[in-house]
Image (cartoon, grey):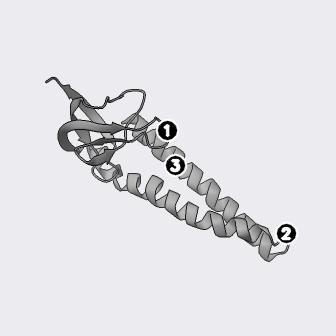
Amino acid sequence: MNYYYGILIIQVLICILALIKVINTIVNLKNKKIHKGYWILVIILIPLLIYYIKYHLIEPTKDLKYAIKGKTKVIQGKVEKVYVAGGSNPFILGGKEFRRNPWSFSPKEGEKYILKYLPNSRYVVEYEKISD
């Protein structure tokens, strides 16, 4: 669970810094302190920032109440696909995408697991490998 809290704190800090930078750039553009060409950068960054905030901040934040209370959902199934570690470290189990801590859980395709996960972000809190 510490990994979940750590990632959440990092995501909040990244969002705050990105918002400050975008707002600062817009203010400087309005005050004509920087070249007009930076409007293109702002137009590109705003949709990317909205996507980042929704996927990497809002979804995991919805799970904060579940993480604090220790309430999780349970699923059992076979790992269908494991993506290269990075970003949210996703893998597919039972047709659903889950997130994981790559240092404590490295699922392998074809293996069966019982997962306890947070319902909104589908972050895996606990896992147990099931032998065939």
In the rendered structure, which disc, 2 or 3, sits on the residue that comes first in sequence?
Answer: 3
For the residues labelled 2 and 3, say whether their Cβ atoms are less than 8 Å apart: no
On screen, residue 106 versus residue 86, left or right, reads left
Residue position for label 3: 11
In depth, the one of 52 and 130 nearer the eye is 130
Q: Sequence order check: which comes first, mark 1 or mark 2?
A: 2
- Which label lies toward us, 1 or 3? 1
Disc 1 target residue: 86
Q: Residue at x 68, y 64 (%)?
A: 22
Q: Which mark is residue 37?
A: none
Q: Which one is closest to the eye, mark 2 or mark 3?
A: 2
> Which of 34/131 is in front?
131
- Vertical comparison of 56 with 70: above or below: below
- Say whether residue 29 is left or right of residue 125: right
Furthest-top residue in this view: 131
In the rendering, at what x and y percent does residue 99 appear?
37, 42
Q: Quadrant of the C terminus?
A: top left
Calculate the distance from the C-alpha at mark 1 to the C-alpha at mark 2.
35 Å
| Helix, strand or loop at mark 3 | helix
Label 1, secondary structure: give it. loop
Mark 2 burial class by Cα count in 10 Å: few <14, some 14-19, many 20+: few
Query: Among all residues in the image, which is located at the extreme left?
Result: 132
Q: Amino acid at mark 2?
A: His
Residue 35 numbered tag = 2
Residue 81 percent across, percent down from the top left: 33, 38
Number of residues whose C-alpha sits closer than 10 Å to that of mark 1, classed few (under 14), some (14–19) or many (20 or more): few
Determine contact: label 1, label 3, CB under 8 Å.
no
Instruction: Give, as a three-letter code, the residue at label 1.
Output: Gly
